Image (tube, rainbow, N blue to C red):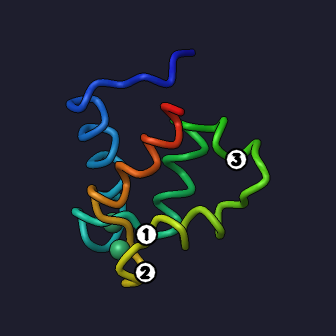
Amino acid sequence: MSAKKSPAELKGIFEKYAAKEGDPDQLSKEELKQLIEKEFPSLLKGPSSLNDLFQELDKNGDGEISFDEFLEVVKKVAQ
Ligand SMILES: [Ca+2]
Ligand SMILES: [Ca+2]
């Protein structure tokens, strides 16, 4: 499976999971978990747990992941 996804695909993935609960433009920790497990499972095989990943991604500390913050995941996958 290629980790490379087009910007449109990424936006689609983000929106699909972000819309599950609460703010449809933000990923909660549970939504991020589902997204990572389904779309980027390789991220959880490394040393960082989901909690670490969430805290790292939530740059503004509001407890949710915006699309801009989500793009940091993509950079990690692309490395
Ligand atoms: Ca949400
Ligand atoms: Ca945030």
Q: Which mark is residue 63?
A: 2
Residue 5: x and y, percent?
Answer: 36, 25
Question: Can you tell me whether the CB of the residue at mark 3 lies under 8 Å from the nearest atom of ligand 2?
Answer: no
Q: Is residue 45 above or below residue 21?
A: above
Q: Which mark is residue 51?
A: none
Of callouts 3 and 1, the N-terminal one: 1
At a point 53% along the width and 68% down the height, the residue shown is 56
Of callouts 2 and 3, the N-terminal one: 3
Q: Secondary structure at mark 3?
A: helix
Of callouts 1 and 2, the N-terminal one: 1
Residue 63: x and y, percent?
Answer: 43, 81
Please report contact status of discs 1 and 2: CB closer than 8 Å, yes or no.
yes
Question: Can you tell me whether the CB of the residue at mark 1 lies under 8 Å from the nearest atom of ligand 1?
Answer: yes
Please report contact status of discs 2 and 3: CB closer than 8 Å, yes or no.
no
At a point 72% along the width and 60% down the height, the residue shown is 49
Image-quadrant location for residue 55: bottom right
How dense is the environment of label 3, judged by Cα within 10 Å: few (below 14), some, or many (20 and up)?
Answer: some
Q: Nearer the viewer, residue 43 or 22?
A: 43
Task: Read off the residue under disc 1.
Answer: 28
Q: Which amino acid is tagged 1?
A: Ser
Q: CA distance from mark 3 to mark 1?
A: 17 Å
How dense is the environment of label 2, judged by Cα within 10 Å: few (below 14), some, or many (20 and up)?
Answer: some
Q: Which amino acid is tagged 2?
A: Gly
